[in-house]
Amino acid sequence: MTSKQGQPGATGFHDRYGLTRIINARGTFTPLGVSRSSVRVGDAVAEALQHYVVIDELQDAASEGIARHIGAEAGAVTHCVAAAITLSVAAAMAGTRPDDIARLPDATGLRNRVVLPAGHAVHYGHPISQAVSLAGATPILAGNAETCPLSALESALGHPETCCLLLVSSRLIEGESIDLAAAVETAHRRGLPVIIDGAAQDLRIGELLATKADLVLVSAHKYMASPTAGLVIGRQELVQAVRAQEQGIGRGMKATKEAIVGVLCALEERAALDLDQWCQAQEDKVSRFVDRAKAIDGLMASTVADPAGMPFPRVHLSLTSGPTSMNAAALAAALKSKKPPIWVMEEKLAKGEIVLELVQTQDDEIDEILARLGAILS
Ligand SMILES: *Cc1c(COP(=O)(O)O)cnc(C)c1O
């Protein structure tokens, strides 16, 4: 996100550990290390590692930081968003009751049904339903993959053993989009809390909180570029119940002191960011890439907005039926087969498209990508 990044182009780091230097045009992807933090965040983390702290005080400071910078009642830091999903569901079942916290994931006798629209049952490296089951809860899919009308949500939420509604805001969701605010209202009418997984939607956090969801979960290590961490943001009472899970199943999902300090630093950097200017820079970066890609024989390029509404575009590339008989899948494979391997988004390959996310891709890497494309297609 910031201009003061380290020197990811330098190979010293990778050589030392025998690692492959890669060029990431695939976005905030977990198997590639997600993001690159600023030097400032790195320094804050290094400093935190030198000290003892009262973790509760540090989580309180994080809550204040989240409240101040994001404008919510309270917040907490968890190991990651997958952990935040499990712990938020656990919190909806067990509250702050020590006995119930201690016996999870055995949720017998607790209200343990978690309603999730079927199209929101996303797979972000593992199925979200597994993050729900880990707490001891049972995911209940409402509607089908194509559509989940409010009436389908109503009837699923009507079951007396329901503990919460889980919604997802992501470019990964399928089917007709759901009016999140209306879904939240449907659950609230039944006195049920709502959790929104907006892991990669941190730049839209205000919009997600405006739905009146009780908890919104976003990643701190994706676009905010902190160390690995998830943010739980929302109502004080439920945030406290999430934190209380550290005496239960949350033990193995805790945020480290260095991650919490890194999050506080990354939050400050985000607050200092001129968002309009940043968005303009993303537009310019993508349109410059598209212009240069179009000049390559055999390649078509266009700018495409993010389907979930994140405020930056991506590059879509496809092949003309020109001299090469290559398809998109072969082009993606060719990009990855030389050194350094270039990783792109592959979910549109079947439609003949390669998608590139350039938010954290640096100018020298962009030059390398365009040179590689030119070489492959010449
Ligand atoms: C990335 C992502 C997650 C998981 O986030 P982690 O912090 O890597 O655990 C969950 N849900 C969605 C929609 C995601 O995009």
Image: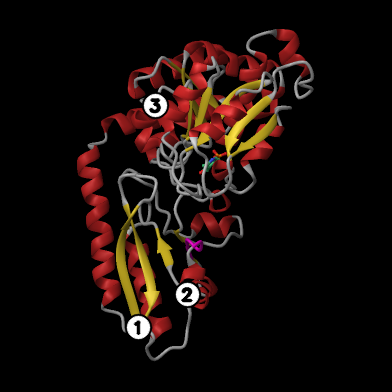
Asked if residue 100 is positioned above or below residue 181 in the image, the reply reads: above
The mark found on residue 211 in the picture is 3
The amino acid type, in three-letter code, at marker 3 is: Thr
To which residue does mark 1 refer? 298
Looking at the magenta stretch, what is its main secondary structure? Answer: loop
Callout 3: few (<14), some (14-19), or many (20+) C-alpha neighbours within 10 Å?
A: some
Image location (x, y in percent) of residue 132: 66, 33
Q: Nearer the viewer, residue 289 or 103?
A: 103
Q: Nearer the viewer, residue 203 or 166?
A: 166
The amino acid type, in three-letter code, at marker 1 is: Gly
Real-space Cα separation, disc 3 to disc 1, in angstroms: 45 Å
Report if residue 345 lies within the magenta region. yes
To which residue does mark 2 refer? 328
Q: Which tag, 3 or 1, sits closer to the chain's start?
A: 3
Real-space Cα separation, disc 1 to disc 2, in angstroms: 12 Å
Q: Residue at x 48, y 20 (%)?
A: 214
The amino acid type, in three-letter code, at marker 2 is: Ala
In the image, the segment drawn in magenta is: 343-347
User: Which image quarter: residue 208?
Assistant: top left
